Image (spheres, rainbow, N blue to C red):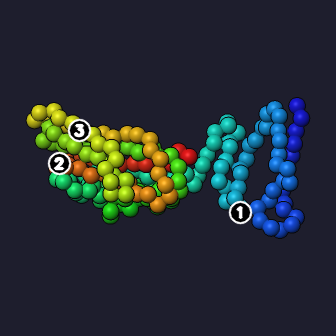
Amino acid sequence: MSEIRVDSITDEAGTGSPSLPNGLGVTGNIDVSGKLTNGGTAGIEIDNAGRIIQSNQPYFLAFGKPSGGGNSLVFGFDTVQYNNGNHYDNSSGKFTAPKSGVYFISATLCYDSGDGFMETRINGIDDLGAHAAEGNRLTTATITYITELTQNDFIQVFTQMNILSSTPRNHFSAYFLG
């Protein structure tokens, strides 16, 4: 097996990002382990088992009894468990996309009236909705999907019904896929 070792690539002209004049063409396999960095900060790490770790990947998870309900935006969950990059604002219920790309979005709300409707809104405009009807019983409505967002787009959850205080059932989350 051939091996290429690179300690560093330096742009001798000092005009910007390090580059190779004609790019880098590779045929075959490149075995990589360690960290790919940007200015000394690890952006991507590949561990010895081959797992890719992206420590700066934007994501959040909020759950518990939210404020709002009864024809309003949902905000102020009891717990914000994760908020990598601080792109979710619990006081407004807004997740703001830090960069353009594809995002995984999920939200579930629990209703005690047996009837529930919720939707996600991107930049205040209806995007995707869910309705649940179970007569006089406890019910949940769930939205889970993948969507493209442009940098600084924001997404929120809206409901038209009263939300039941149910910590394991009410949640809102997003994750940047790429």
Mark 1 vs mark 2: in front = 2
Q: Where is residue 23 in the image (x, y as percent from the top left)?
A: 82, 49
Asked if one can make out residue 116 in the rendered structure from this viewpoint, the answer is yes
Sequence order check: which comes first, mark 2 or mark 3? 3
Left or right, residue 170 beside residue 15: left
Query: Which residue, given by chain and number where applicable, does mark 1 sit on?
Result: 39
Residue located at (16% from left, 39% from top): 115
**Mark number displayed over residue 131:** 3
Q: Which quarter of the rendering shows the N terminus?
A: top right
Dot 2 alpha-carbon crowd within 10 angstroms: few under 14, some 14 to 19, many 20 or more? many
Under circle 3, the secondary element is strand
Mark 1 vs mark 3: in front = 3
Q: Given the image, on which type of amino acid does mark 1 rest?
A: Gly
Q: Given the image, on which type of amino acid does mark 3 rest?
A: His
Residue 46 lies in what quarter of the image? top right
Under circle 2, the secondary element is loop
Residue located at (50% from left, 58% from top): 151
Query: Which residue, given by chain and number where applicable, does mark 2 sit on?
Result: 161
In three-dimensional space, the C-alpha distance between marks 2 and 3, rounded to whole angstroms, equals 10 Å
Dot 3 alpha-carbon crowd within 10 angstroms: few under 14, some 14 to 19, many 20 or more? some
Q: Where is residue 176 in the image (x, y as percent from the top left)?
A: 51, 48
Q: Where is residue 87 in the image (x, y as percent from the top left)?
A: 45, 60
Residue 105 lies in what quarter of the image? top left
Compare residues 110 and 28 and report the one nearer the observer.
28
In three-dimensional space, the C-alpha distance between marks 1 and 2, rounded to whole angstroms, equals 49 Å
Residue 48 vertical position relative to residue 172 in the rendered view, above or below: above
Residue located at (82% from left, 46% from top): 24
In three-dimensional space, the C-alpha distance between marks 1 and 3, rounded to whole angstroms, equals 47 Å
Asked if one can make out residue 79 in the rendered structure from this viewpoint, the answer is no
Sequence order check: which comes first, mark 1 or mark 3? 1
Q: Given the image, on which type of amino acid does mark 2 rest?
A: Met
